[in-house]
Image: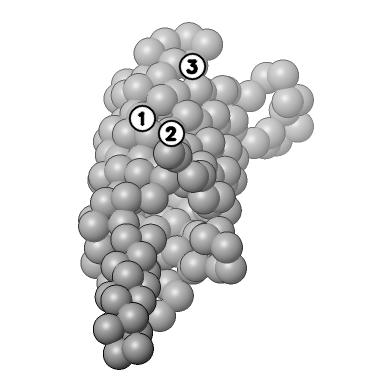
Amino acid sequence: MRRILLIAAVLFMGVAAWAQDNSHRIGLGAGVSYHFAGNAVLFWEYETHYHNAWEVFAEGQMSLPQNGQQFGDVARRWGLGAAYKPCIYRARNRYGSARFGASFGASPSDFQAALLAGWQQSYVLRGGWQFYWQAGASVTLPKWKGLFHAGAGIGIKMPVRIR
């Protein structure tokens, strides 16, 4: 009986340790940034050991109307990018990661490229779902409504099981 309990304990410890590594998530988020712009992002995240993660994302950004502008007159931008997120802080049911990345895209008038840096705080919910908030800054070339952008956003991450 002791052998059976020992084998069962070792198996359960192995399964619990495996469940936190190499997980995939699909996420959706929205936010605002300085220069009165709103953005939406759809991303795929691959988590490696110790909550470090890689992210590939598609984003859309639109400046918000000001001084009587109509929505058709505002600037728009679309882009694709990637980010590396090393885990800096871990606690029970939450962790914080730095976020470094680059994105490439276009606005109706020209090509856009940006370098990103920021912080993402994630909260683990039941069933592997996660809620997150993030804040960061970017340098956009050529200038799109300014060279520097700072912003914040919130979103949700849904676990994806890949076999």
Task: Please state the horizontal and vertical placement of residue 67, each as a whole percent of the image.
Answer: 70, 35
Q: Is mark 1 on a helix, strand or loop?
A: strand
Q: In which quarter of the image is the N terminus?
A: bottom left
* Disc assigned to residue 107: 3
Residue type of the residue flagged with mark 3: Ser
Closest to the observer, 82 or 105: 82
The answer to whether 70 is drawn above or below residue 25 in the figure is: above
Q: Earlier in the sequence, mark 3 or mark 2?
A: 2
Closest to the observer, 125 or 11: 11
Dot 3 alpha-carbon crowd within 10 angstroms: few under 14, some 14 to 19, many 20 or more: some
The answer to whether 138 is drawn above or below residue 157 in the figure is: above
Task: Please state the horizontal and vertical placement of residue 42, each as a whole percent of the image.
Answer: 53, 36
Residue type of the residue flagged with mark 2: Phe
Q: Earlier in the sequence, mark 2 or mark 1?
A: 2
Query: Residue at point 72% right, 19% down?
Result: 72
Camera-side mark, 3 or 2: 2
Residue where numbered disc 1 is placed? 81
> Separation of disc 3 and disc 2 at Cα?
17 Å
Residues under numbered marks 2 and 1 in contact, where contact means CB atoms less than 8 Å apart: yes
Q: Is mark 3 on a helix, strand or loop?
A: loop
Residue where numbered disc 2 is placed? 57
> Separation of disc 2 and disc 1 at Cα?
5 Å
Q: Quadrant of the C terminus?
A: top left
Dot 2 alpha-carbon crowd within 10 angstroms: few under 14, some 14 to 19, many 20 or more: some
Residues under numbered marks 3 and 2 in contact, where contact means CB atoms less than 8 Å apart: no
